[in-house]
Amino acid sequence: MEPTIEEWAKRLRERELSAVELCRHYLGRLDDAAHLNAVVARDDEAALVAAAEADARRSAGEDGPLLGIPITVKDALDAVGMPCRSGSLARLDDPVRDAEVVRRVKDAGAVVVGKTNMPEIGLSYETDNRVYGRTDHPFDPTRTPGGSSGGEGAILGADASPIGIGTDGGGSIRVPSAFCGLFGLRPTTGRVPTTGAWPPGRAGSMFDLTCVGPMGRSKADIAALLRVLAGPDLVDPFVPPVPLGDPAAVDVTRLRVGWYVDDGIAAPLPVVRAAVESAATAMERAGAAVAEVRPPDAVRRATELFFRATAADGGDGILGLVGDRPEDHVPQFMDLVLNPPYGGSTSAVDYFGVLQAMFDLRADVRRWMSGYDVVLVPVCAGPAPRHGEPPAGVPRERYLRYESFNYTHTYSVAGLPAGAAPVAVADGLPIGVQVVGPAWREDLVLAALGVLESAFGGFALTDGLRPAVASAADRAGA
């Protein structure tokens, strides 16, 4: 298992190695994991230049948790010097400026070593597209790492990148984190600006559903990255100046913790139920007050409302952006756009009704959450499924209804901070648990993720799952 960014930062600070040496190390790790097809764009020369600049900044007396740390970025976010395709053949121009979050990590001294694969414009939990092809799971090539931040999930799960930035609309950080044995956090809606994401979505039917957030191999790592990403940029209209809390200041023994597995929509596998129950027991042993709870009835509409929002214009906006030639898109993308599972809107009045129903669900869930500090629920009804199949044994013909993901859709529509942590392994696959907190209380979510990391081992749970792969250097010498 590779060191965490916290450990790498300590070694950089103590001059045990340079940022250039660390960058070369991870460029080699990316080579070793090339079989996953997780990283779709690199500029090694520019990365080494950035690493040398980080070394110069350190020599000048600067320090920081990301200074000299390599980072990978989902291909939905602009990074100058590398293309940003979002899995689509439609975007041919390269970025002329960094996305705001990319600018922030670069300013903090992080070294962008690659862009990671995703389904076309993020519309799937299977990472596949006509530009770059399919990404495989780091432990089993017959399975998906999830989506839409599936490339990030795969490369981090392979221990080939130390930290990454993903985006999450309906579960796109939490699902690949759970499938690949990682920590991931979808912040509160409005915590992190999406400026420089492609396609931009604030003025579209997705409204404020899309969030940018950290993915990594420890709770401390994603907390450190969140501190760099968070805060207004005076461009994204949904990001107010709300202070970010400190998870280290949270007294776990005073937390009120609820948990549930049954939401009336998803049918979780026994291993998922057991993982959530184990997480609840761990919180109780840490001193928290824990109780099994029943979610509000509103959560049963979460998946329907999420997809009705994305199909509010009947798919016209998406097809106008990326084109309607079937050969340019994978079949699942075309099926979802042309045959939205819950229908689209037929008028502006209908769309406004969908928005109002979403806001009503948000209000119901937030009122319910006021009785708890964190709530533990599944991320998905099952572990990573085989390519082209829905999770948890759902019949293939019901794949595009995405009911197994109602747990993540609920808190996307509610706009609440939600993280994923690895809790168990079943049949060689990680099982993650979702931790949800009240609005703007990422500190509570991170504190609870820390409890689960201590109780179950975190990323170390997957140490024996990664297949041995010869390094690029070894292959060159063979």
Image (tube, rainbow, N blue to C red):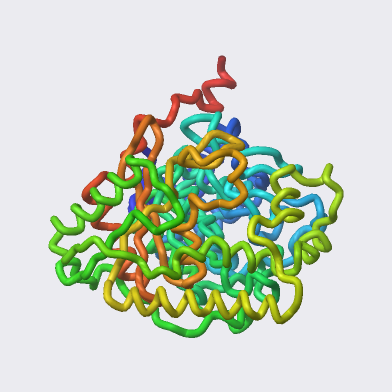
Residue 76: image quadrant is bottom right
Which part of the image, by quadrant, shows the C terminus? top right
Q: Give coordinates of residue 67: x percent, y percent.
A: 46, 60
Rendered position, 272 above or below 61: above
Left or right: 448, with 77 as reference point: left
Pick the residue in front: 90 or 379: 379
Between 86 and 377, which is closer to the camera in this rendering?
A: 377
Can you see residue 5?
Answer: no
- What residue appears at the point 43 percent right and 83 percent down from the top-left corner? 242
Residue at the extreme top of the image, as rendered: 478
Q: Is residue 74 left or right of residue 271?
A: right
Residue lying at 21% horizontally and 49% vertically, measured from the top left: 455
Point out residue 371 in the picture as x, y percentages from the top left corner.
27, 76
Residue 90 is left or right of residue 158, and the answer is right
Question: Measured from the top left, where is residue 232 in percent x and y?
Answer: 53, 80
Residue nearer the viewer, 84 or 376:
376
Question: Which is more toward the observer, 346 or 425?
Answer: 346
Q: Is residue 407 above or below residue 380?
A: below
- Can the viewer see residue 213? yes
Residue at 86% across, 49% down = 325
| Residue at figure coordinates x 59%, y 21% from the top left | 476
User: Where is residue 196 shown, x and y percent of the image?
Assistant: 66, 68
Count of numbered circles in the view: 0
- In the picture, the quarter occupied by the N terminus is top left
Please identify the quarter of the rendering in which residue 299 is found: bottom left
